[in-house]
Image: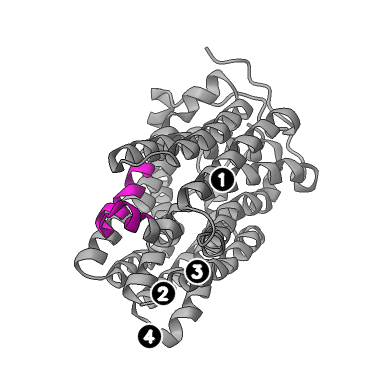
Amino acid sequence: MNMEKSCPIPEPFRARAGTVFFLATLFFLNFIGRFIFAPLMPFIEQALAITHAQAGSLFLFMSLGFSAALFGSGFLSSRLNHRRTLVISAIAVGLALLGLGLLRSLSLIRLALFVLGLAAGLHIPSALATITAMVRRQDWGKAMGVHSAAPTLGLVLGPLLVAALMEFVSWRSLIMSLGLLSILAGMAFVFVGKGGDFPGDAPKPSAIKKIIRLPSFWLIIVLFVMALGGSVGIFTVLPLYLITERGLDKTFANTVLGFAQISGFLAALAGGWFADRVGPKRAMAILLGAGGLATISLGVSNDRWLLFILFVQPALTGSFFPAGFSALSRIAPPNLRSVVASLSIPVAFFIGVGVFPALFGYLGQNHSFGLGLVLAGSLMLLGPLFAFSLRFIEYDQEGC
């Protein structure tokens, strides 16, 4: 039975910046704990003696768990609240990473990655509901920009950590250290974190029926598939692409990849301002179209242009998410926002960050990773068509 819902009063971003940054910290550890496996994959392939296709499939198992948790998160947050759900997510992510550091069997690692995905998937719906409830609507772009910058920061630091530490520690020690940090952050949120002290909404059949009848619900899924596949999905195979197909040294490849992602981190922060300035529809259209061209170029460019495009492509794809989450929050009434997130993001994430890497791995083994990049970029070129077809609700209320 749901607890009584007591919604916070929306305030300017400045008044709630501390809580938003704390949520972004939890999201950062949530994200880097999962996608540190991308720059580690050449080492993991060697240690476990697996193929490119098997390596790509590891992200599929993680995405299955992540998507399942996103869909079911409303059941948990409706019985606890968003705050407790965020704490459970952070601590469970840490425990899963500690377990992964001890496993040796490929089948058990796949199972543990599924569990890691389950734990991580609880974060986004509760964080989205918390932010949009406590921050006034005209500042959503800024708040989403800070929160969305967390995974892009993970894309920066993940490869750099691997490049800096793999000569001194094992890949197992590295992921276990991240697990410990996630546990500590979750415990810190218990004592000093604020926000989210209201329950979520479980995806009831009546609510699901309302949402799936919205054309914009399906459009937002396609847009997020494009953005996730073109950013995180591609990132999962970029180390293998640069090392095995373009001939870069492991340390140099991860160093370049980490520094290249800085542009995505800065662009994610600027993306919130850009979305508030031009509107989420126009922002998504511009960024997906330009990002598609950059992704295609990444797959076909010669060595002279490759490093330049590596810096440009993350900036374009990383800027999408503040606008994307702002748009997602406007296609349904406030009481259905967390339900919309728990229905749309699982599908988009499973395809963009699960199916795409598995497809990239298959193409990399049987054809080339470059072909996968060209296909992903071509899909993103359709982004403007879908973005301008979105319809926002007229009664765009604040609160929860």
Horizontal and vertical percent position of residue 30: 54, 43
In this view, 192 is above or below 33: above
Q: What is the spatial separation of the Cα atoms under label 3 and label 1, in whole angstroms?
A: 20 Å
Mark 3 or 2: in front is 3
Q: Nearer the viewer, residue 173 or 361?
A: 173
Label annotation for residue 257: 3
Q: Nearer the viewer, residue 328 or 299?
A: 299
Q: Residue furthest right?
A: 15
Horizontal and vertical percent position of residue 354: 34, 49
Quarter of the C terminus within the rendering: top right
The residue wearing badge 4 is 302
Q: Is residue 191 visible?
A: yes
How would you rate the neighbour count of disc 1 (Cα within 10 Å): few for under 14, some for 14-19, many for 20 or more?
many
Residues drawn in magenta: 44-63
- What amino acid is found at the position of numbered circle 2 in the picture? Leu
Q: What is the spatial separation of the Cα atoms under label 3 and label 4, in whole angstroms?
A: 17 Å
User: Do the CB atoms of the residues marked 3 and 1 lie less than 8 Å apart?
Assistant: no
